[in-house]
Image: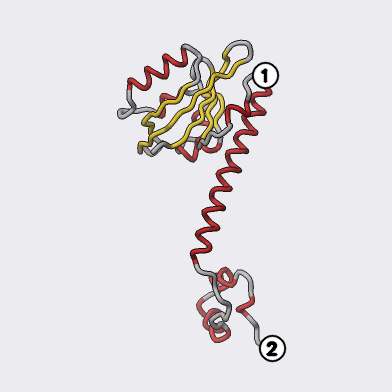
Amino acid sequence: MKKNFMNMQSLDIYLSSLSLEESRAIENEIRASEIKLMPLRSWDIYNDYYSRQLVIIRQQNSINTFKELAEKFEWTNDLDAIFKGKSFDALVVTNKKAKIEWVSEGFTEMTGYSSTYAINRTPHFLQGEETDPAALERIRYKLAKDEPFTEVLVNYKKDKSTYKCEINVIPLKTQNTTHYLALERKAG
C-alpha cells in the first residue's frame, strides 16, 4: 500500500528531518495537493485581528498584575477609571524617590531592558542627548504637585535607538501619594 503523504499533518517538518537519500526515496510519492488554498488576503485579515487580540490580552494581564500590586499597597485610586479608554505598551510603577519598583512585560518589549535591570533605577537610564530638558523639568514640576499629567519624551532603547514615548502619569495614593503609575506607549 502506498503512503499518502499529502494528508500528513506537518509534512514540511517531516520532510525537513529526512536525509537527502531518504528524500529522494519518497519524492515520487509526493504530489501537488488538490486542495484549494485560501488567498493570503484572508490570512492578513486574521493576522491583524489576532495581533490586536494579543495586545488586548497583554494589556489586560498587565492591568490584572497591577491591580494585585495596588491591593498590596492599599492604593485608594479608582483603578478602573485609570485604564478606561487608555492604550499603553508598558506600565511602570515608581516610588516617591523615582525608583522603579515594577514594570510590566511590555516594558522589555518597548525598551529592550529587562525588568531586573530596571528595578531600583530611576527612569533616567532611558534618557539621552535628544531628551528635551524642558520636558524633564515639566515632569519634575508636575510630580512635585502630585498632579496627573501626560508628556512626550524622546527615550533610548537598550540598543541606543531613539523612540518617542508618551507617558501618562497618575499619582497612586493611600492617604498621601506613595507611588506613581506611568502608562507608556510609543508615540508617532
**SS under mark 1:** loop
Q: Is residue 67 above or below residue 26?
A: above
**SS under mark 2:** loop
* Residue 157 drawn at (x, y percent): 40, 36
Locate the C terminus and report the quarter of the image it occupies: top left
Q: Between residues 63 and 159, which one lies in front from this camera angle?
A: 63
Local crowd at mark 2 within 10 Å, few (<14), some, or many (≥20)?
few
Q: Quadrant of residue 152?
A: top left
Q: Earlier in the sequence, mark 1 or mark 2?
A: 2
Q: Amino acid at mark 2?
A: Met
Viewer-nearest of discs 1 and 2: 1
Locate the N terminus and report the quarter of the image it occupies: bottom right
Q: Is residue 45 above or below residue 24?
A: above
Q: Quadrant of residue 153?
A: top left
Determine the CA span between mark 1 and mark 2.
70 Å
Whether the residues at callouts 1 and 2 have beta carbons within 8 Å, the answer is: no
* Residue 99 drawn at (x, y percent): 50, 20
Q: Is residue 96 above or below residue 157?
A: above
Identify the residue at image location x=32%, y=25%.
132
Identify the residue at image location x=41%, y=36%.
187
Residue, disc 1 = 74
Residue, disc 2 = 1
In the picture, the disc for residue 2 is none
Q: Amino acid at mark 1?
A: Glu
Mark count: 2
Local crowd at mark 1 within 10 Å, few (<14), some, or many (≥20)?
some
Q: Between residues 20 and 61, which one lies in front from this camera angle?
A: 61
* Residue 10 drawn at (x, y percent): 60, 69
Q: Residue furthest left?
A: 129
Identify the residue at image location x=42%, y=14%.
141
- Give the colouring mode of the picture: secondary structure
* Residue 159 drawn at (x, y percent): 38, 39
